[in-house]
Image: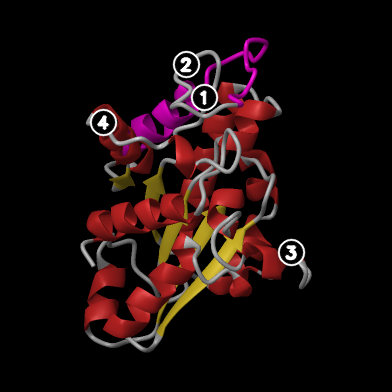
């Protein structure tokens, strides 16, 4: 266990006590920071996520630093990546950092490729198992909603043409919800947060950059949802 414990709240005690703590954010472009403030600068500098000041990951880093200057937040997000790719690269993206807390999300690219839903679930489970073997706690979160012809377009003028996809995107986020419930893990359900605003009459059509990415406001919502889930 590398001197760590599987206690799911050990990271919180370390955060509160001012001890060194490492958080790894593992995911796709939503984690990397696509279209948030600083994204264009990052593209011109070898895709350096450290330049994406508006990403939810960088916002989380600033928040945790306020609470504990010894907190380290690692952005292991890779645009276009899937759960199978993340599992294959786990040692480099996660284990090398020996995290106390893993923030995990995949689904968008698994849906688009498509990765079979059963493979997606199995690889997420293995990632969670491997994180537990390191002594890391895990939190799952959902991205989206996406604008797709098979479901809601949310007013976006160019929704994803997904009629030929084996599964609707909702099945992938539902898998994250199922895993969180089955394993007793916290879930930051950002998709439902944003959908709730839309159902209450908020026009989110201008939030979209394309059918699957939001502008800065989307990262702000993810950050807020994760902070509420972590109670920080």
Q: Which mark is residue 201?
A: 4
Q: Which of the pair 126/73 is nearer the observer?
A: 73
Q: CA distance from mark 3 to mark 2?
A: 32 Å
Magenta residues span 158-182
Asked if disc 4 and disc 2 are in contact, CB closer than 8 Å, the reply is no
Closer to the chain start, of discs 1 and 3, is: 3
The residue at which mark 3 appears reads as: 43
Q: CA distance from mark 1 to mark 4?
A: 23 Å
Q: Secondary structure at mark 2?
A: loop
Marks 1/2 in contact by CB < 8 Å: the verdict is: yes
User: Crowdedness of circle 2 by 10 Å Cα count: few (<14), some, many (20+)?
Assistant: some
The residue labelled by disc 1 is: 169
Q: Mark 4 to mark 2: distance in Å?
A: 18 Å
Tags 4 and 3 touching, CB below 8 Å: no
Mark number, residue 151 = 2
Mark 4 burial class by Cα count in 10 Å: few <14, some 14-19, many 20+: few
Figure check: 211 above or below 16? above
């Amino acid at each position: 266990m590398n001197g760590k414990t599987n206690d799911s709240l050990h990271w919180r005690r370390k955060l509160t006590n001012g001890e060194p703590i490492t958080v790894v954010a593992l995911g796709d472009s939503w984690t990397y920071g696509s279209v948030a403030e600083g994204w264009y600068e990052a593209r011109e500098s070898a895709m350096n996520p450290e330049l994406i000041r508006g990403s939810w990951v960088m916002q989380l880093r600033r928040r945790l630093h306020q609470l504990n200057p010894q907190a380290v937040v690692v952005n292991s997000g890779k645009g276009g990546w899937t759960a199978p790719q993340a599992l294959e690269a786990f040692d480099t993206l996660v284990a090398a950092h020996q995290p106390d807390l893993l923030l995990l999300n995949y689904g968008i690219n698994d849906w688009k490729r498509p990765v079979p839903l059963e493979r997606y679930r199995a690889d997420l489970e293995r990632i969670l198992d491997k994180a537990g073997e390191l002594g890391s706690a895990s939190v799952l979160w959902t991205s989206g909603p996406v604008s797709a012809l098979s479901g809601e377009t949310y007013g976006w003028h160019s929704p994803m043409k997904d009629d030929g996809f084996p599964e609707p995107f909702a099945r992938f986020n539902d898998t994250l919800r199922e895993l969180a419930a089955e394993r007793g893990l916290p879930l930051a359900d950002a998709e439902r947060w944003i959908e709730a605003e839309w159902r209450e009459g908020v026009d989110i059509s201008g939030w979209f950059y394309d059918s699957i990415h939001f502008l800065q406001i989307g990262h702000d919502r993810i950050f807020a949802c994760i902070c509420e889930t972590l109670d920080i």
